[in-house]
Image (tube, rainbow, N blue to C red):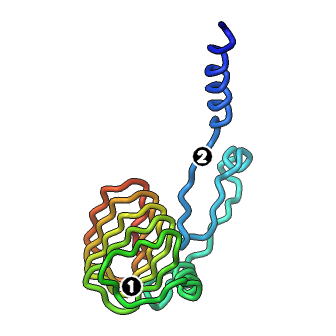
Amino acid sequence: MRAPRLMPLLSLALLAAGLTGCTVGIVDPSEPSQKAPTQEQTSQAPDAEKETPEAETPATSGLSADGQEERDRLIAAATTTMPCPDGPLTADGAIVRVEGACPELVIEIDAGVVIADDVDELTLEGSGTVVYAENLGVVTVTGSASSIFWSGATPTVHDSGSSNTLRKG
């Protein structure tokens, strides 16, 4: 009778042991790759020389140089190029280029990329999605782990999701 009780406990212990030390990180595609400091780096003497990253040179569009380069790369890799759609974008995992001005753009994509120009009202309901836009008026985000980057003036932002990155650049 003891063996059946031992199996669920053993399974739970193995699961807990397997999950110990797991971490999740959100990567900002417009930022240079940054690795977590090693134990050796964090325990250096205070007067030790430290490398400082080079200053980013802003592109003419208002995005950082890396952000503009990534936007251009994603435009070239777009699986769909279209004018402002009448309904929501729903192609999970796709790279969608939306050309021209949009009064309203609703994105219900998970793990995708949308590159837009000017959007008056942007709604992002998907998770794990990256959006690049030139100018945004109002941004509403309900999903999680997504990133929205713009190059114009800072929009009005409503973010009820979690772990989202919303910023100029």
Q: Quadrant of residue 6?
A: top right
Residue 43 visible:
yes
Residue 57 visible:
no
Hey, what amino acid is under mark 1? Glu
**Residue where numbered disc 2 is placed:** 23
Percent position (x, y) of residue 13?
A: 65, 25
**Residue where numbered disc 1 is placed:** 134
Percent position (x, y) of residue 111?
A: 51, 65
Q: Image point 63% across, 66% down: which residue?
A: 33
Asked whether 168 or 52 is in front, the reply is: 168
Q: Secondary structure at mark 1?
A: loop
- Determine whether, in the image, residue 113 is placed left or right of residue 23: left
Q: Quadrant of residue 169?
A: bottom left
Mark 1–mark 2 distance (CA, rounded to whole Å)? 33 Å
Q: Image point 46% across, 64% down: which residue?
A: 110
The relative height of residue 141 versus residue 3 in the rendered view (above or below) is: below
Badge 2: residue crowd in 10 Å (few <14, some 14–19, many ≥20): few
Q: Secondary structure at mark 2?
A: loop
Which of the numbered marks, if any, corresponds to residue 69?
A: none
